[in-house]
Image (cartoon, rainbow, N blue to C red):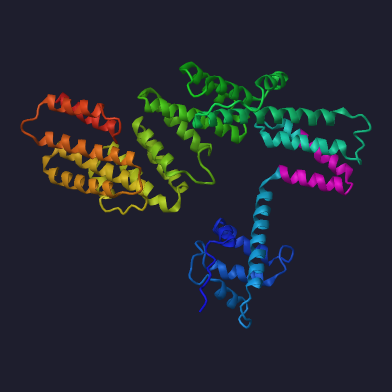
Amino acid sequence: MPQKIFIHNNKLTHSLRVLSPDELKSLGKWLQSPWANSNTKVYELYLLLKKYAPTYDSPQLNRESIFNKLYPTKPFNDRWLRNIMAELNKQIESFMIHQRLEKEEDLKKMLLAKEYEKRHQTKRLLKLAEGFNEQLEAKKDKGLEDYYYGCFLNDLVYYSPETSAQWKGEKPLLNQADAYLDQFYLLAKWRYRSEFKERQRLLKKEEQPLFDLEILEKIGEHISIPAVNLYDQKRRGGDHLSEDEFEKLKEDYFECFDFLSFKDQQIFYFYLLNILIKLHLKGQSNVLSLLFSFYMKGVEQSLIIHQNRLSHSTYTNIIIAGINVKQPQSVLNFIASYTPFLKKEEQHDGQTWGTARYHFYNKEYEEIIRLLRDHKFSIPSFERRGRTLLLQTYFELLSIDQSYISLFFYFNQTFTRFIQRDKTISLGRKKAYLSFLKYTRKIADLIISKKKTSSSFVKVLQDIENESTIQGKQWLKEKLNILIEK
């Protein structure tokens, strides 16, 4: 018997997997339209495959089985099946293009302008160009696509034989196209120059830039684009902005925020955010409030939400930052509003851990135990965070009531085994967690010891200060300083 050939990882199933449930449903209507599809077998194949969404990994999805369902009275013909699968994939691609086109108003206008020009609809072409130019001039947040389309449309009208603009010596269209071209070139070159420098820094590789700074400055003498000024400040400051330079760039960024395209808003947002994170990691606690407000600006403006998704690392960073600046209610509101932006499989873990973190701030330890003790985490990073928070909770209870000693040491032991066996983290992160567990045991031993002295805690604090890699370092230091002062 010949070996079954599955279609789990072919081009067609990959195309189907990227469609949302609503898009998959709309695809069915698309395939039923005679305008889009005239092959009934393509629609039958769609109906057959739709049953196995969203994974499309059923053992039933093998070539012979699919063919037999499409052609129950015919002998297997691989060429027929390949042709139908290729046609369905082609239809999915056309459907996705149509879906995108419906959202791209300016692109639709450009395509319509080409049709008007081709079909000799001169008045309609001129009216479309006039309206587009007025719309573009009034738009505050112009980006690369705006300048490109502006240049393209005015160029199209100017050189169209039907308009006779070229022969009548009408300069406005040509001047407009030329101005948009300069603006496109200037903004694109500054953006790429900035990215080029960032790439050099990350790769630690010195290379000559592909364009001359003097040329950009010369072109920009009579052109005012807010993003260009920010790119120039970014170039001058690099990765090591002084406090004054950072403040100036931050103020200018927020001042012209509404005049930046979404892409430029994102570029400068992440640049400033990364600087704040680095300052925080260096121990500058005064940046915490600004860091939290920056995070909130990012989610409110969807700058850090990509395709309606918020990464779980950003989600946890925002909660931690909010707790650190003592804004628990803002954290609770964030959890309620933005947990749905996590991937579906992350949402329960994220909400459980985030809510527990809120209760930890309020010292509501029994609530934390209720939330975390029996929760089955499905995401490894949330499980590590959840176990860490539960261990900290048992430690806090131990500091108040030594009857928790057995529970603390038992959980510490199971957490240590968990980390030792964890294959989802790097050796560096593993070392950091194991150091954290070791020092919590040391401190707990001292708490229950009858021979403990203040100097004993000071010695552990000094050891922790000398550790280069340790999880929860700040929390451990806070606990030790409290014990030393007792």
Q: Main secondary structure of the magenta part?
A: helix
What residue is drawn where x is 49% and y is 62%?
A: 55
- The one nearer the camera, 300 or 253, is 253
| Picture coordinates of residue 335, whole percent (x, y) | 40, 43
Residue 12 appears left or right of 326: right
Q: Residue furthest left?
A: 450
**Which residue is situated farthest in the right direction here?**
168
Outermost residue on the bottom side: it is: 73
| Closest to the observer, 67 or 18 | 67
- Disc count in the image? 0
Quadrant where the image shows the C terminus: top left
Q: Quadrant of residue 446?
A: top left
Q: Give above or below for 440 relative to 94.
A: above
Query: Residue furthest toward the top?
Result: 244
Taking depth in this image into account, of 150 and 458 the one nearest to the observer is 458
Quarter of the image for residue 29 reads bottom right
Q: Which residues are magenta?
A: 106-133
Magenta stretch holds residue 118: yes
Q: Position of residue 115 (x, y in %)?
A: 82, 48
The spot of residue 395 in percent (x, y) is: 19, 39
Using the rendered view, name the quadrant where residue 391 is placed: top left
Does residue 465 appear to the left or right of 62 in the view shown?
left
What residue is shown at x 37% (from left), y 25% (from top)? 282
- Above or below, 171 relative to 438: above
- Residue 482 counted in the magenta span: no
Percent from the top left, x then y, of residue 103?
66, 47
- Look at 86% across and 48% down and name the residue there: 118
